């Protein structure tokens, strides 16, 4: 499981370039609705993680509009790995 964006706008889940294993997770912090974009192959991992952190303030999740294959998707925030030259 990877938290892709913390405290994001729910509109960020509309991005179709995200992998189809990306979910918009909703929880409450001090009564305010907060959203994260999470990439996970197992929903139980997301549930356990957010339930342990927020307990009763955890609301739920919905799948993003992502259409990309997760194996081929590259995180735009990660630096490219340099190829070794011989």
Image (cartoon, rainbow, N blue to C red):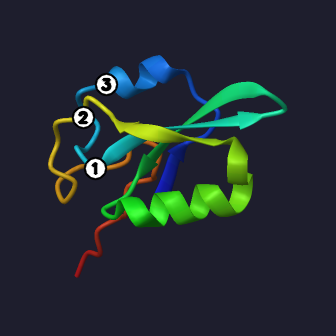
Q: Which residue is mark 1?
A: 21
Q: Which residue is mark 3?
A: 15
Out of 84 and 56, give the one closest to the viewer: 56
Q: Left of 20 or right of it: where is 26?
A: right
Mark 2 and 3 residues: CB-CB less than 8 Å, in contact? yes
Give percent across and percent down for residue 49: 59, 62
Mark 3 residue element: loop
**Sequence order check: which comes first, mark 2 or mark 1?**
1
What is the spatial separation of the Cα atoms under label 2 and label 3, in whole angstroms?
A: 6 Å
Give percent across and percent down for residue 70: 22, 54
Give percent across and percent down for residue 7: 64, 33
**Sequence order check: which comes first, mark 2 or mark 3?**
3
Q: Left of 32 or right of it: where is 40?
A: left
Residue sitting at 23 percent across and 49 percent down? Answer: 73
The answer, for residue 53, to whether it is visible in the render is: yes
Query: Is 40 located above or below residue 65 in the figure?
Result: below
Residue sitting at 26 percent across and 29 percent down? Answer: 65
Of the numbered discs in the image, which one, if any, rests on residue 66?
A: 2
Mark 1 residue element: loop
What is the spatial separation of the Cα atoms under label 3 and label 1, in whole angstroms?
A: 13 Å
Quarter in which the C terminus is drawn: bottom left
């Amino acid at each position: 499981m990877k938290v892709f964006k913390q405290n994001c706008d729910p509109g960020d889940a509309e991005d179709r370039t995200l992998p189809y294993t990306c979910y918009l997770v909703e929880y409450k912090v001090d009564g305010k609705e907060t959203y994260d974009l999470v990439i996970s192959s197992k929903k139980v991992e997301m549930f356990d993680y957010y339930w342990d952190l927020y307990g009763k303030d955890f609301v739920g999740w919905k799948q993003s509009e992502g259409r990309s294959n997760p194996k081929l998707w590259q995180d735009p925030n990660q630096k490219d790995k340099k190829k070794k030259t011989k």
